[in-house]
Image: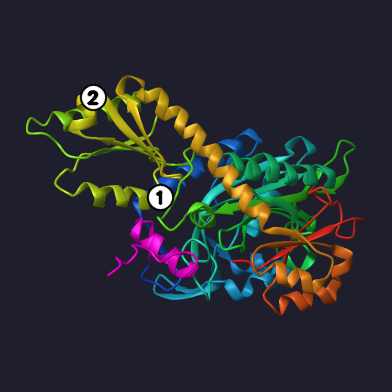
């Protein structure tokens, strides 16, 4: 009888595969309240790496971190009509606290444009105070009817940037800078996930925004995932919250605001972009554990275990993030499979026989390739292998995406292509009727691009192409 697979094969049932990876790789569990999640230590360590790398880029773009309240007066949301209308179905509202009814209902933070806008209006007086570039790392609550761990949960972790600018031009430039220099750079160079960047159509924009820019990635089942967005809010929130400044001539001007964010949804993107039928696969640059040193078995004197721990210390000293698994009482095959499920980029297998020859065996998670290496050359070889794996994973993901992206000329062709990937269709051939027709088959316009993949200046710019797909 054939042995049952540890996880469901992707081709058999991709959603089941995803759930199996979450469980077997010890990434997350469902929380006690429907739609919430518990992020387990292994996944949270990866999230911390994501936070560090995104935060570094945010600060290089000039923004500073702050923190604003979780509870927001309901009246704040009411000030911007389109905003409150867009978020009303997802709001969690507190009406009772401290043993009595509240005088005003309190909204649990779905996003912070309104509360931050209130304080921007206090902090900005003159053109000298601009731009005001703020960011916060926080949790938010959006009541999700169809939850899925990391992808759509009622509570999730994220960063949200909120900025005030002196002009529409300054706001547009900064929104694009965040998209390119922070989000796209991070996703490509750290997560090894190629993304399409583009402009959202009006129906898909953030509530209250004039323009939304997006990073869209393709998962291994061909569906799209929105990985991050950057919004030009125009003067809508500035007008609602009186966010203004005195210009150089003494006149009163309204600010132009932007907001932008990425979330723990990136964990879902990481899993579905790189994972395979052996489990999770983590790119080395974002991996909390880049190399696991596994003791195959110890000898009677315990010298093999000592060697494994010494090798781990040497790799750590070389700047590599390392775990040592010296639990030889557990069968080696089981432990090797567990680390493979967790997607650690490189395994170093240490056993008495190889040690006697002055060697260990390196195993690449992405390709499964095994390489005997002299112990004296291990640190350099492992470091080089990590660079090679990072590049190989980005190349493989790019090839998968590009091979499943086709240019079409009709709505019917776009719908057919979206069954397995992306379709690119001239936007003027799609039109409102085409958007509605695609929507009936759960296909949406992920973003608009120029013919060469750039950002269109307007929705109706000549030569604009619509990128369509099914999505999460």
Q: Nearer the viewer, residue 348 or 21?
A: 348
- Residue 279 location, x and y as percent? 41, 55
Q: Quadrant of residue 31?
A: bottom left
Residue 153, percent across and down? 49, 66
State the quadrant of the N terminus: bottom left
Q: Is residue 435 a member of the stretch shown in magenta?
A: no
- The disc placed on residue 44 is 1
Image quadrant occupied by the C terminus: bottom right
| In the rendered image, the vertical position of residue 156 relative to residue 253, given as above or below | below
What residue does disc 2 label? 357
* Alpha-carbon span between mark 1 and mark 2: 39 Å
> In which quarter of the view is residue 439 placed?
bottom right
Residue 28 visible (yes or no):
yes
What residue range appears in magenta? 1-30
Q: Is residue 448 above or below residue 169?
A: below
Instruction: Specify whether residue 14 is painted magenta.
Output: yes
Q: Residue at x 72, y 71 (%)?
A: 416
| 467 sits left or right of 410 in the view | left
């Amino acid at each position: 009888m054939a042995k049952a697979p540890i996880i469901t094969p992707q081709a058999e049932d991709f959603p089941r595969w995803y759930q199996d990876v979450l469980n077997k790789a010890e990434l997350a569990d469902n929380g006690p309240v429907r739609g919430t999640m518990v992020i387990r230590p292994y996944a949270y360590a990866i999230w911390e790496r994501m936070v560090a790398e995104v935060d570094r880029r945010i600060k290089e773009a000039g923004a500073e971190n702050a923190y604003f309240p979780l509870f927001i007066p309901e009246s704040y949301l009411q000030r911007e009509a389109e905003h409150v209308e867009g978020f009303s179905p997802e709001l969690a509202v507190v009406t009772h606290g401290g043993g009595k009814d509240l005088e005003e209902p309190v909204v649990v933070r779905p996003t912070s444009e309104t509360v931050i806008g209130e304080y921007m209006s206090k902090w900005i007086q003159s053109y000298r105070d601009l731009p005001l570039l703020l960011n916060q790392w926080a949790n938010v609550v959006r009541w999700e009817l169809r939850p899925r761990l990391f992808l759509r949960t009622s509570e999730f972790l994220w960063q949200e940037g909120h900025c005030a600018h002196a002009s529409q031009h300054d706001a547009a430039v900064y929104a694009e800078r965040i998209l390119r220099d922070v989000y796209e750079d991070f996703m490509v160079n750290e997560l090894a996930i190629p993304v399409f960047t583009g402009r959202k159509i009006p129906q898909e924009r953030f509530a209250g925004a004039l323009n939304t820019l997006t990073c869209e990635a393709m998962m291994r089942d061909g569906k799209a995932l929105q990985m991050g967005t950057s919004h030009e809010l125009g003067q809508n929130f500035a007008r609602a919250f009186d966010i203004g400044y005195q210009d150089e001539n003494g006149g009163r001007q309204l600010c132009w605001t932007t907001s932008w964010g990425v979330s723990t949804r990136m964990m879902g993107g990481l899993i579905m972009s790189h994972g395979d039928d052996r489990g999770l696969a983590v790119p080395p640059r974002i991996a909390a554990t880049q190399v696991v040193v596994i003791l195959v078995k110890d000898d009677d004197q315990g010298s093999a275990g000592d060697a494994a721990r010494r090798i781990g210390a040497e790799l750590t000293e070389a700047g590599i993030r390392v775990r040592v698994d010296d639990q030889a009482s557990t069968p080696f095959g089981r432990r090797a499979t567990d680390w493979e499920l967790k997607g650690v980029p490189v395994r170093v297998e240490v056993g008495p026989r190889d040690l006697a020859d002055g060697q260990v065996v390196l195993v690449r998670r992405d390709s499964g390739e095994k390489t005997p290496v002299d112990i004296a050359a291990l640190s350099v070889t492992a470091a080089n292998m990590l660079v090679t794996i990072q590049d190989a994973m980005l190349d493989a993901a790019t090839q998968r995406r590009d091979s499943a992206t086709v240019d079409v000329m009709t709505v019917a062709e776009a719908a057919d292509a979206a069954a397995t990937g992306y379709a690119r269709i001239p936007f003027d051939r799609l039109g409102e009727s085409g958007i509605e027709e695609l929507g009936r088959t759960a296909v949406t316009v992920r973003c608009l691009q120029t013919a060469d993949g750039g950002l269109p200046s307007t929705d109706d710019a000549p030569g604009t192409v619509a990128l369509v797909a099914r999505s999460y």
